[in-house]
Image (tube, helix red, strand yellow):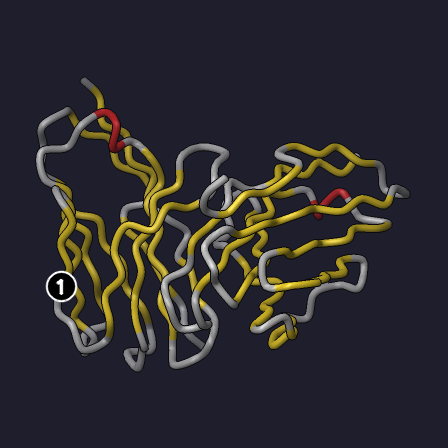
Amino acid sequence: ETGVTQTPRHLVMGMTNKKSLKCEQHLGHNAMYWYKQSAKKPLELMFVYSLEERVENNSVPSRFSPECPNSSHLFLHLHTLQPEDSALYLCASSQEEQREQYFGPGTRLTVT
Amino acid sequence: KQEVTQIPAALSVPEGENLVLNCSFTDSAIYNLQWFRQDPGKGLTSLLLIQSSQREQTSGRLNASLDKSSGRSTLYIAASQPGDSATYLCAVRKDTDKLIFGTGTRLQVFP
């Protein structure tokens, strides 16, 4: 595996379910990001981790809970989501926050 | 608050044409600007990164320019091909802040 990978690629969940999105980077980077991409809206940064510590949380609802156990892995835990949370969730990584970001293919989430 | 605008929102051109995509930003004090390509339902692929001290960057048939003082960047695609069809996004960074993305230009190149 090379680059940034995300699993699953597609996820359908009910509003009462609990699920997790996984991101893994094989680039030796030390910063990782979660973005949300909704239809007809710009990408929105959700969370930033640098050296495994959360450095930014853009006022994301608590039903989204990130976890970064090491510099190669990033999770987004989901619970009691709303239909408006349906979107493409993208993970990215970079070597330091200021450097070029590399994106994964995304997880297409549908909340029913 | 930094805002990023991309014009046009959509563009359809015949194969072989040279084309220009525009990106404008409201706060000229940026650290760098990055152009991405996104295929339908897929992640983003970084195309070019321009540091604030640079005026342009080139990669193959792509050339991106940056005019910080006027808050503008352009992505020039030479001799367009059907494989160039995608959504093109620009994003700016101010110092150590997060990337601020535009809404993108959806490009279709037809044979």
Element at label 1: strand
Q: Chain of mark 1?
A: B
Q: Is residue B46 left or right of B44 when viewed as pictured? A: left
Q: Residue at x 59, y 52 (%)?
A: A36
Q: Residue at x 15, y 42 (%)?
A: B77
Judging depth in this view, the residue of B55 and A4 nearest the camera is: A4
**Where's residue A53, x and y in %?**
65, 74
Judging depth in this view, the residue of A110 and A66 nearest the camera is: A66
**Where's residue B106, x and y in %?**
34, 38
Residue type for callout 1: Glu
Judging depth in this view, the residue of B11 and A48 nearest the camera is: A48
Q: Residue furthest right?
A: A16
Reply above or below: A47 against B21.
below
Which image quadrant is residue A8 in? top right
Q: Which residue is mark 1?
A: B56
**Where's residue B67, x and y in %?**
16, 71
**Where's residue B79, x and y in %?**
9, 33
